Every structure is written in structure tokens, then in C-alpha cells.
Image: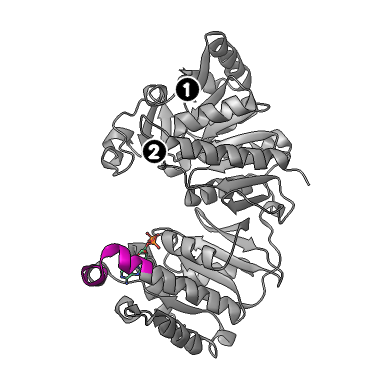
Amino acid sequence: MKIQLGCIADDFTGATDLANNLVRSGMRVVQTIGVPNAPLAAEVDAVVVALKSRTIPAAEAIAQSLDALKWLQAQGAQQIYFKYCSTFDSTPEGNIGPVTEALMDALGTDFTIATPAFPDNGRTVFKGYLFAGNVLLNESGMQNHPLTPMTDANLVRVMQAQTKRKVGLINYKTVAQGEGAIRERIAALRADGVGVAVVDATSNDDLHLLGPALKGMPLVTAGSGVAIGLPANFGLKPSLQASQLPAASGLQAVVSGSCSVATNAQVAHFKASGRPARAIDPASLMHGQSDAVVQQVLAWAAPLLKDGPVLVYSTAEPEAVKAVQAQLGVAEAGALVEHALAAVARGLVGLGVKQLVVAGGETSGACVQALGIAQLQIGPQIDPGVPWCHAPSENGGVHITLKSGNFGTEDFFSKAFGVLR
Ligand code: ADP
């Protein structure tokens, strides 16, 4: 069982985003949480290894990325895709430049591209400058990011500051002329000693023109956008089979720890539809009461599950969240709630739930960990950026979807189960 494309993503939701784009373009994809220590659980065309390496020290990011590379090569990967954020989140210390360089060295290649372009999400690159929506990156709010402030939109300069290799540009005029012109430009840049080329792309058409020119390139570095042009290089085109998961069975439940605006509306919508919902009050979890609360919630859910999905949530409006945080501390409140919801998720699966919706990025991380999930096969998209996944296990596995904060329409919690049917 050999894979074709091996991907290394520098964070978890970014990995899902990439996996989702690959599936929609015709690849069967498994996303792994970290570098696996087990063989692949399903036969697929691509694997996305999700790391948490975006803002850790560069040396650690390099070590983790090289570990992932080794594992992907052992699975037969013919091309490596280093995925970073579509806003190019990094600092002069890295980690995009140092990881790119380390991967190039390990692969013995002297050339790669770098482009965070993701037109579907409003990220475009023109003359080497990155736009987020209608404004330059450094006017988009990203200049104030707490960890990776982006104060320059010129990606050639930004990349040059974090790599020893010479950085060049393949501009929109070349991209518009397609594969032949792009390959000629690459040859010219290479002859000039350029090791990394930023590539312009302002539309999906540009990404489809770029795709064929990347065939055979050992390493591609990009946001998730470039992915839409790659499966064709492996003879794959969009198909329903790519997103096919094992048939869904078992009971249904939603666990929500996200307090984002969209999630609050989704919780309200689910309750208004008459489905059973149970709130967890963070204050009730204090003084070692968490286990007792979890048991009460599971006892409440047990007789209801046979009649359809139930919702367990800590989702609250901003004022309520602030009040709890003032009482418990921000980190402590978050950790208490995450721990309890993860225990609820595990308990629900124990009660026979095999279709689980989880809302919240951090909440998802906690639930996936509590469920011991190490690999996720990526299935059909419920809403942009949010696919159903299947986590195999001895007892047939569980279908799970991990919805980060503001994703999904108001009826997401009920709609999701319809997509699986
Ligand atoms: P999102 O994707 O919307 O950001 P996350 O799950 O990543 O959601 O983050 C929500 C955080 O808020 C988690 O740490 C969660 O435990 C915490 N949390 C959830 N409900 C409450 C609440 N009612 N009060 C305080 N904190 C909460």
C-alpha cells in the first residue's frame, strides 16, 4: 500500500483544511495526529501528518518535520507537501524558512516553490505581495498577531529573511501562460541560483495552471490552495469515491465547547428544533466535581440516544464566559471544561455513539486525544473546511467531525448527520 503525496502540516486545523482540498480534488486522504507509530489504517492516495510546529522553536519544528518526512517516505510518498498558513504565519526566525530548507536538504533538492495563495478564502498573491481579502497582509490585522505579527506583505522579502537560499518570484504573467512558461521560468531562476520561488496566484485558474508544472518536484511548500492542482498529476480527478467513508452506524451526539458566535447560533438552533440538549456549567466542575457531573450527563443521555442526536454543551455567550473566567481564571476554566467535555465524548462513545460532532478547535483536540484517535480518514464536506472523518478502531470505528469556532451554517448540528446518511 503506497501513497503518492505526503503532506506535513504545521497545525491541526490547517491539516484538515489541506486534506479537505485534496479529497475534493480526487485524492483519498488520511490525516494523522502527529507522526504515526502504526501503519496506515486505510488505503489512500495521500497522508497529511498534522504537527503543532507553527510557533515552537525552529530546531524543534525541523526535527518534527524531518520525522514526518521519514515516515511519509517509508509509505512511498513520491512528492512532499509542506503546508503552512495562508497568511504565511512566521517570524524572521521561522518556521517556514528553516523547515523548508531542512526538507530540501533531506530530499536532496535545490528548488521549491512557496505560495500561501488560497483564493477560495480570499488569500491571493500578486507580484509577490500577499493579500488577505481586499487588503495587504500587513493591513489585515495580521500585523498585530500575538505570536507571528506579519508586518510586510512582500513574500519574497519575508521568505528571504528566514532562509539562506536565494528567493525569487514567478509572477502572474508567467503563471497565466501555463506549464511550459512556468517550467522555463523555474529553469532560469535555478540557473540564477534561486532555491525558493514565491508564486503569484489570484484565482483557482492560476492554481490549476500551476499544478502541472509541479509534477515531479520533490518538495512543494504552500498553503492549502495549491493542493487543488496536484491530484491531476497523479492521474486523479474529482470523484465521489475519494470522499467515501465506511457506512455510518450507531447512535448520534454533539459535544460543543466552542463559544464562538456561529456555535452559539448552532446550539440555539439545535435546541429550538426540539432535540434534547444539556448544558454543563463550568462552575459546577470545580472542587473535584467534574467526574460526578460527567456521570450525571451520561445518565441523562443514555435513555435519549436511541431517539436521535443529543447535544452536550458548555457553549455560552461572551458575558457568561467572562464571568466564569473571572471566577476560575482563563486557562483553568478552559482546561476544566475541555477535560469534562472530552470525558463526556468518551462516555458517549461507550454508550454506543458512533457519529459524533465536536464543536471547538481546542475542544476537538481534547476529544480526539481522549478517544485515542491517531488517524482520521477524510470524508465528505459538511460545510466549507469541515469534513466528516472516520477513525478506525477494533469495534468498527467512529465517524467524527471537528468543527472549529466560526465554521458552519446555523443548522450544522442537524445537517451534519444528514450528510452521513
Ligand atoms: P473555538 O474553536 O470556538 O475557538 P475552542 O474549543 O477552541 O473553540 O475554545 C473554546 C475554549 O473555551 C475551550 O478552552 C473551552 O474549554 C472553553 N470554554 C467552553 N465553554 C466555556 C464556558 N462556558 N466558560 C468558559 N470557558 C469555556
Name the residue located 43 percent from the left edge and 74 percent from the top edge.
Answer: 340
Vertical order, 120 against 257 (above or below): above
Q: Amino acid at mark 2?
A: Asp
Left or right side of 143 for 95: right
At mark 2, the secondary structure is: loop
Name the residue located 72 percent from the left edge and 40 percent from the top edge.
Answer: 74
Checking the image for residue 148, the label placed there is: none
Residue that numbered label 1 is attached to:
172
Left or right side of 34 for 240: right
Res 393 visible: yes
Res 202 visible: no
At mark 1, the secondary structure is: helix
Q: Main secondary structure of the magenta part?
A: helix
Residue 115 coordinates in the image, percent (x, y): 48, 31
Residue 213 coordinates in the image, percent (x, y): 62, 24
Residue that numbered label 2 is attached to:
89
> Quick one: label 1 or label 2, which is nearer the N terminus?
2
Q: CA distance from mark 1 to mark 2?
A: 23 Å
Whether the residues at callouts 1 and 2 have beta carbons within 8 Å, the answer is no
Q: Nearer the viewer, residue 372 or 118?
A: 372
Query: Which residues lie in the magenta part?
Result: 321-335
Q: Nearer the viewer, residue 216 or 140?
A: 216
Q: Amino acid at mark 1?
A: Tyr
Left or right side of 316 for 227: right
Task: Categorize mark 2 by other alpha carbons within 10 Å: few (<14), some (14-19), many (20+).
Answer: some
Outermost residue on the right side: it is 1
Nearer to us of marks 1 and 2 is 2
Quarter of the render that holds ligand 1? bottom left
